[in-house]
Image (cartoon, helix red, strand yellow):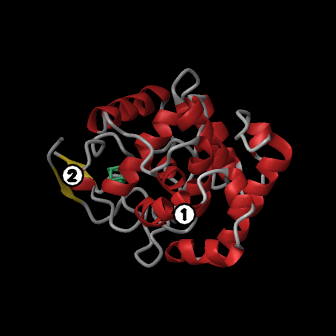
Amino acid sequence: MPKGKIIKKAATKVSAKSGNDVSPVKRVKKDVAHEMIRKLRELYPDADCELTYDSPFQLLTAVILSAQTTDVQVNKVTPKLFKRFPTAKALAEAPIEEIKDLIKATGYYNAKANSIQTCAQQLVLNFGGVVPQTLEELITLPGVGRKTANVVLGVVFNQRGWSVDTHVQRLSKRLGFTKNVDPYKIEIDLQKLFPDDDWSNISITIIWHGRRICFARNPDCPRCPLNDLCPSSEVKLK
Ligand code: SF4
């Protein structure tokens, strides 16, 4: 990691209160973007989905539960939930109050209980209880958007797809991969920047970096291996 000192004015200002980037940075060239991803892959060779699950249905349910909370928190509730209701059919027929009770610790549990149960019911009704393997079919399910669908497609079906979650949105802007704020437009920019790559693996690698170094508030630029390439780096190189 290159040595340097922290400068006061970063290319991208980060609001201390919200952690949101408030000014877009210059977009980087394709070769620089690829070099950044190469370095991140070197840093996180074992980057993988951090949710625990035993089947595509369980991963789909866990991803829905991960909204507005952390994977660690979801992993605390899913062992009991999946032991009690391991399949789409079991969850579709479960008493809603029991589901709410089991997932309470993930927050927004009323809405999430309804979401995972209606999703399970639609899976049973329309897909025989089996998670479909196309984006078009997955996004017909309640509570399932492109981000959730792409996580499932990439992680359990080895299909290419960008999971543009809060970390990918934030880092894509900081790293100069996009100037857009809309997740779908960011996804299109990323597809153009990395046309021939494993999008699912890059998404997960970026998510790992967002969780470990490039935090929403106070990104740890001095410890970041990208601080010589990143247009938002707060480290000034000598
Ligand atoms: S932590 Fe790394 S990627 Fe994030 S802003 Fe700092 S230098 Fe850039």
Q: Is residue 50 above or below residue 99?
A: above
Q: Nearer the viewer, mark 1 or mark 2?
A: 1
Residue at left offset 69%, top offset 47%: 146
Q: Is residue 46 left or right of residue 25?
A: left
SS for callout 2: helix
* Residue type at the position of mark 1: Leu
Residue 117 seen in render: yes
Q: Is residue 145 left or right of residue 12?
A: right
Residue 170: assigned label = none
Percent from the top left, x then y, of residue 28? 47, 37
Residue at 50%, 44% in the rendered image: 54
Q: Is mark 2 within 8 Å of ligand 1?
A: yes
Q: Which mark is residue 223?
A: 2
Is 93 left or right of 99, judged from the image as shown? right
Q: Is residue 223 left or right of residue 117?
A: left
Q: Image quadrant of residue 210?
A: bottom left
Q: Position of residue 65 (x, y in %)?
A: 58, 63
Q: For the residue carrying disc 1, how many other residues have a C-alpha within 10 Å: few (<14), some (14-19), or many (20+)?
A: some
- Which quadrant is the C terminus positioned in? top left
Q: Is residue 111 above or below residue 128?
A: below
Instruction: Give the SS element for disc 1.
Output: helix
Q: Is residue 28 visible?
A: no
Which comes sooner in the sequence, label 1 or label 2?
1
Dot 1 corresponds to which residue? 81
Q: Nearer the viewer, residue 135 or 211?
A: 135
Q: Quadrant of the N terminus?
A: top left
Residue beneath the point at 52% across and 58% down: 83
Say which amino acid is labelled 2.
Answer: Arg
* Mark 1–mark 2 distance (CA, rounded to whole Å): 38 Å
- Who is closer to the viewer here, 184 or 8? 184
Q: Quadrant of residue 70?
A: bottom left
The x and y percentages for residue 29 are: 48, 31
